[in-house]
Image (cartoon, grey):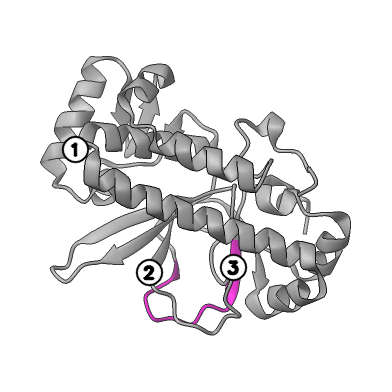
Amino acid sequence: MRDEWKTNNLLNVLRPDDLALLSPHLRLLQSSANSILYDHGQNVETVYFPCRTTLVSFMISTEDGMIVETMMVGREGAVGGIVSQGRLPAYSRIMVQYNGEFVTIPVAVLDAAKQKSRTLDNLFARYADCMLSQIFQSTACNAVHNIEQRAAKWILAAIERTGADEVPLTQDRLSSMLGVGRSYVSRVIGRFKEDRILNVRRGHIVIHDKQQLEARSCTCNDTVKSHFNMVLKGVYPESERDAVAEEV
């Protein structure tokens, strides 16, 4: 395997001794959009570290058949067996939203390494806390913020995780993230287009004015980023230039 692990920020902050425990077991996986890493009820046996612009979504099915996306994870983190010892059922569906590469490792191997290294165990425990903070903030956001604010927040979250000004985010998928009908999202996107904040083409959202998008957004995304930066300094960089190894 080449140095793809360096393009995942969580792996990139590992101390040399901790990386040495994992590196013999890391494998590279190519993914395609809409691939399912885990479905509800499946045993969690592999940890996936998204690299570069790869983006995954956590999806929950409701009793009326609606699919709601609850969280996105990109190069800042990992999915699958972060805290548990594996072979436990996945609660949500985890789907690849933006195709690319993953670095993978068996959950059992990661768990054994965490037992050997207190710093490695601490790193993943803190990352799990950060994931939980994103869920908490998303719950609060859905309760108090309007559709335009939430739409802007999700789009910003996507471009920050991919590092690109164009993200593969359709209006259907955005409506799923927001838990609202597509007509509501179409009106919001229409206003954004009229104000030259963004455009839509071939199933992608292209950002023209990130500052204006931030002005339309709630502050929930910034709140989560702030918590990441306090708990895991360097794991949530603002740019590729900042994605350097730091002691955690």
Q: CA distance from mark 2 to mark 3?
A: 14 Å
Residue plotted at (13% across, 38% down): 184
Q: Is residue 112 above or below residue 26?
A: below
Left/right of residue 7 with respect to residue 182 in the rendered view? right
Q: Nearer the viewer, residue 182 or 76?
A: 76
What kind of residue is marked 1?
Val
What kind of residue is marked 2?
Ser
Magenta region: which residues?
37-48
Residue 131: in sight, yes or no? yes
Q: Which residue is mark 2?
A: 92
Image coordinates of residue 118 in percent, x first then y, are: 78, 67
Closer to the camera: disc 2 or disc 3?
3
Instruction: State if disc 3 and disc 1 touch (CB < 8 Å).
Output: no
Residue at disc 2, secondary structure: loop
Q: Nearer the viewer, residue 52 or 144?
A: 144
What kind of residue is marked 3?
Ile
Q: Quadrant of the N terminus?
A: bottom right
Q: Earlier in the sequence, mark 2 or mark 3?
A: 3
Q: Is residue 112 above or below residue 12?
A: below
Q: CA distance from mark 1 to mark 3?
A: 33 Å
Q: Quadrant of residue 59?
A: bottom left
Q: Which residue is mark 1?
A: 185
Disc 1 packing (10 Å; few <14; some 14–19; many ≥20): many
